[in-house]
Image: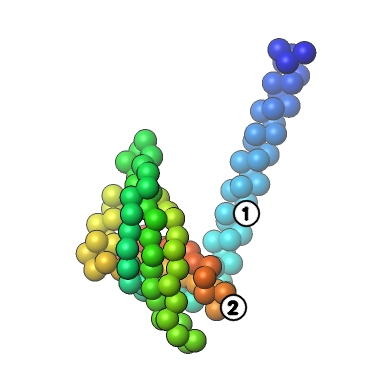
Amino acid sequence: MFNSPFITIILIVLALVGVFIFCYQTGVDYEKFKKEGIRTEAKILSKEKIGASGTGNTRFRMVVEFATKNGTVSVTTKRFFTPEDLIKIMRNNTVVLYYLPQDPQQILLMPSEME
């Protein structure tokens, strides 16, 4: 039964639907942060390498601190960074991010927007 081409096709279709939903949700989140979020530069308090991809990108767990109109906020986040992004980040030990004003704990790191 599991060797049937019909089952294989169904599994492939389900995998493609899953990838499509993931990509769509990522785009929705990105647009939400760009539209409703506030752009700021955050100071990196600590960073710890926790992994790497096969393409040379490095995954870090970072604690960042930034100012909001309600005070200073510290957030822990995880993200893959390209070598080019790491050069920009290491220069000033800061990173550009967007945060939602109603919940500053939700952030989107955007090192690609750094100069």
Q: Is residue 114 above or below residue 59?
A: below
Q: Nearer the viewer, residue 78 or 37?
A: 78
Residues at marks 1 and 2 touching, judged by CB atoms closer than 8 Å: no
The crowding category of the residue bearing disc 1, from other C-alpha atoms within 10 Å (few below 14, some 14 to 19, many at least 20), is few
The structure residue drawn at horizontal position 57% and vertical position 74%, both measured from the top left corner, is 103
Q: Amino acid at mark 1?
A: Gln
Q: In the image, residue 6 lies at what x, y percent?
A: 76, 19
Look at mark 1 in the image and give the residue it sits on: 25
Q: Is residue 22 above or below residue 98?
A: above
Q: Amino acid at mark 2?
A: Gln
- Give the quadrant of the N terminus: top right
The numbered mark, 1 or 2, whose residue comes first in the sequence reads 1
Q: In the image, residue 94 lies at what x, y percent?
A: 31, 68
Look at mark 2 in the image and give the residue it sits on: 102
The structure residue drawn at horizontal position 65% and vertical position 47%, both measured from the top left corner, is 21
**In the rendered image, which quarter is residue 77 located in?**
bottom left
**In the rendered image, which quarter is residue 43 located in?**
bottom left
